[in-house]
Image (cartoon, helix red, strand yellow):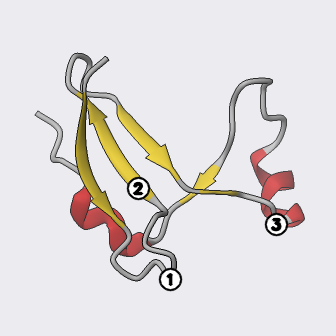
Amino acid sequence: MMLRFLGKDPDSPSGGSPTLWQDQDTGDLIVQGYTLTDPVAVGEVGDIPLGEAVVRIPLRMVQFLPKAE
């Protein structure tokens, strides 16, 4: 898997998260971010399968998302 860096949250206080990449082979997006922990929001999402996570990224990071081709 080869990843292409798309961007980091420019307002991150630590400068490291959230971060977005794109898989060069499949076009899939790879997200590093903060795990959703708000109990009400987690309840709305429902069961999260083992090996999966719900990740929150700021709306301001949409600028880093590539347009679908």
Q: Position of residue 62 (x, y in %)?
A: 31, 63
Q: Position of residue 54 (x, y in %)?
A: 66, 46
- Mark 1 vs 2, N-terminal side: 1
Horizontal side of 9 relative to 50 (left or right) equals left
Question: Residue at the spot x=20%, y=25% of the render?
Answer: 24
Question: Residue at the spot x=18%, y=47% of the render?
Answer: 66
Say if 11 sits above or below 44 in the image.
below
Real-space CA distance between mark 3 and mark 1, rounded to the nearest whole angstrom? 21 Å
Kindly indicate the quadrant of the structure image that contains residue 33: bottom right
Q: Please state, as top left, top right, bottom left or bottom right, where the C terminus lies in the image.
A: top left
Count the labels in the image.
3
Name the kind of residue labelled 1 in the image.
Pro
Name the kind of residue labelled 2 in the image.
Thr
Label 1 crowding class (10 Å Cα cut-off): few <14, some 14-19, many 20+?
A: few
Which residue matches tag 2?
19
Horizontal side of 24 relative to 19 (left or right) equals left
Between 58 and 5, the one nearer to me in the picture: 5
